[in-house]
Amino acid sequence: MTAESIGIRNIYVMMAYAFRTVDSSDTAPVLSEEFDHLHDLLAHILERGVATQIKRGLHRDYQSQIEEVAGVRGRIDMAQTVSTRSMTRGRLVCRFDEYDADTLHNQALKSVLLLLARHSEVSPDRRKAIRRLLPHLAEVTDVAPQSIRWNSLNFHRANAPYRLLLGVCELIVHGLLLTEHAGETKLATWFSTEEMSSLYERFLREYFLVHHPELSPSAPHISWDYADVDAIGTDQLPRMKTDLTLERDGHTLIVDAKFYDNTMQVAWKSNKPKVHSGHLYQILAYAKNQDVKQDGSVSALLLYARTAAVLQPDLDVLIQKTRISARTLDLSLPWEQVREQLEAVAARV
């Protein structure tokens, strides 16, 4: 399964859910346009979003500064003043906070805009539009895209619109392979399987949080249901972390999201496609340990992102009172049909 096999518009919708901006007024205009390449879609989202943010006002925050000034500003740093002999020049070294736009968030935005502005595979018109934005970020420090620590970027109500923009920036940086040849950048595989798998999981969880809060969507850890109170080495048991759990009227559905190039494995003896044994054992362990009452109130679903293979997982069995299923979600279809498939998942609870 690759990003290229997913409808380009659906990539945007998945990101909108995953980065919690699904209610953005920009969704409809983006979905109404045609994009031949994923990088053009991402460049469009970023250009449009940054332009809107500039009109609203860039995110600003207090930044600590240390500077030699005439007079006093903030707090005098006596040690620095003495060591630099600033007083002989009639100046003082002061520490103060300045409320400006040179934040980590804006530095990340600017670094990726600069990257796209010189990217040969982004359309010329879009590159021009991006270049027109750069003067508005003149006060923001230039940083190397590889130096950005994405996990350190925090979000709150004041900078919430940055969530999707910086999510797109991170995907762009991970999707571009920087080279020194001819001073250009070259496209690598846009998203690795690991990155797409993470996006897929977040998308599924956020979809149900938005549309089915009554199902209490969550991704909890499941405890091992061992009976022996004197058991030894229980800390060595692996953690069971679910991708998505839905609940209604005492029934629980555990959904394990799978994004793989091959949705089925081929048995070496029979040469017939089978559901991945490791995946099946994993989801069965989740369900059996969650169903502590052993009354069949817990079911489980392996939900694969559909590939182009002829045979796809289509399993629905009752194993020791526990219903185990394996299905696919076809992300290449128009969004309306993707949503129908997701609603069918909700109906399983």
Image: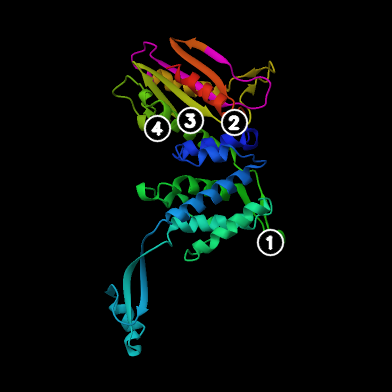
- Image quarter for residue 116? bottom right
User: From the viewer's perspective, is the residue at label 2 or at label 3 nearer?
Assistant: 3
Q: Amino acid at mark 2?
A: Tyr
Report the span colored magenta: 290-316
Residue 233 visible, this angle: no
User: From the viewer's perspective, is the residue at label 2 or at label 1 nearer?
Assistant: 1
Mark 2 or mark 3, earlier in chain: 3
- In the rendered view, does 335 fall on the left or right side of 163? right
Give how far apart the Cα atoms at labels 1 and 4 are: 51 Å
> Which label number is shown at residue 183?
1
Give how far apart the Cα atoms at labels 3 and 4 are: 30 Å
Mark 2 or mark 4, earlier in chain: 4
CB of mark 2 within 8 Å of CB of mark 3?
no
Give how far apart the Cα atoms at labels 2 and 4 are: 28 Å
User: From the viewer's perspective, is the residue at label 1 or at label 4 nearer?
Assistant: 1
Q: Residue at label 3?
A: 204
Say which of 2 and 29 sits in front.
Answer: 29
> Which label number is shown at residue 260?
2
- Asked if 210 appears above or below 173 in the picture, the reply is above
Residue 12 visible, this angle: yes
Q: Amino acid at mark 3?
A: Leu
Mark 3 or mark 4, earlier in chain: 3
x, y percentage for residue 216?
A: 36, 26
Give how far apart the Cα atoms at labels 2 and 3 are: 16 Å
Residue at image coords 35%, 80%: 69
Residue at the limit of the structure toward the right, as seen here: 182
Q: Amino acid at mark 4?
A: Gln
> Which label number is shown at residue 236?
4
Mark 1 or mark 4, earlier in chain: 1
Residue at the limit of the structure toward the bottom, as seen here: 88
Q: Is residue 62 magenta?
A: no
Disc 1 crowd, CA 10 A, few/some/many (<14, 14-19, 20+): few
